[in-house]
Image (cartoon, helix red, strand yellow):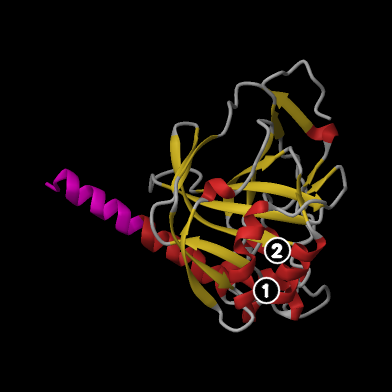
Amino acid sequence: MLTLNQRASALAFFILILTSAIAQEVEDESEFNYIRGSEKGPKRWGEIKREWSKCNNGDMQSPIDLSTKRVKVVKNLGQLKKKYKPSIAIVKNRGHDISVKWEENAGLIEINGTDYLLQQAHWHSPSEHTLNGRRYDLELHLVHQSSNPNAKYPIAVVGIFYMIGRPDSFLSKMSRKIKALNEVKEMKAGSIDPRWIKMGGKKYYRYMGSLTVPPCTEGVIWNINKKIGTVSREQVKLLRSAVHDSAEKNARPIQPHNGRQVDLYNPNPTQTPN
């Protein structure tokens, strides 16, 4: 019989292995790109590796268009419960994007009674999801892993849209480190506080989808902030110039909706979704 400490250690080891496996799948930028029509482009991702087949034949793929016509306004989803804290991180140039990966416990979000531990954040430019057909200038993804190895949905992502305007404060704090990634692939970033990322507002969209890069794993709970943030043109240019030429515009094309429900959490449901 395992002691409580032994069970906790085993669970932590399991989560580490699972998270590492996902990270290894998506971090080899030489195996895929975003060039439409390319042999390694988005339409061919599912043919490159057998374990990437969902990219071509999955029926719950991301990103999608968040059309107001399909949105169901609900109140019982509840406000996103975020419990983030500062933690040691590294900043990485993965070729297809720039990411911040926390190496220690950086906190979590809670969804339906399940804790999802924050793993990493990365940027896509232009945005991957669209809102009534509109692409924004940038989209940030905060990727979380379930603390429950038996969770039906092991991954949860928080997404934030940005349009050109005032500089984003989080990117301002990270800019010097991102510039350094032109010389090295990764660097220690010291303690990074996820609470530096301004989410704003309580409303968010939720739907079931997938990772937006290979292996396009399905069963991902997407939570996309309705409030649009701002980012400067220089900050978008910084992110684009740091990655490989084939990923300067690293947004996967919109995927079929396939009748999926999109919920909009609204604490005042008498208001319209707009």
Q: Provide the secondary structure element on which disc 2 rests.
A: helix
Is 204 above or below relative to 153? above
The reply to whether the magenta stretch includes residue 15 is no
| Relative horizontal placement of residue 171, taking residue 112 as reference (left or right) | right
- Looking at the picture, does residue 15 appear above or below residue 66? below
Q: Is residue 61 visible?
A: no
Q: Main secondary structure of the magenta part?
A: helix
Q: Which residue is mark 1?
A: 47
**Is residue 176 visible in the rendered structure shown here?**
yes
The residue positioned 83% from the left and 76% from the top of the image is 37
Question: Which residue does the image show at 82% across and 51% down from the upper left?
Answer: 165
Q: Position of residue 26 (x, y in %)?
A: 57, 69
Mark 2–mark 1 contact, CB under 8 Å? yes
Where's residue 77, x and y in %? 60, 27
Residue farthest toward the left in the current orientation of the protein: 1
**Residue at the image position 72 percent from the left and 78 percent from the top:** 40
Q: Is residue 172 above or below residue 107?
A: below
Q: Which residues are magenta?
A: 1-14
Residue 11: image location, x then y, percent: 30, 51
Relative to residue 203, is residue 257 drawn left or right? right
Identify residue for label 2.
56
Nearer to me, 251 or 80:
80
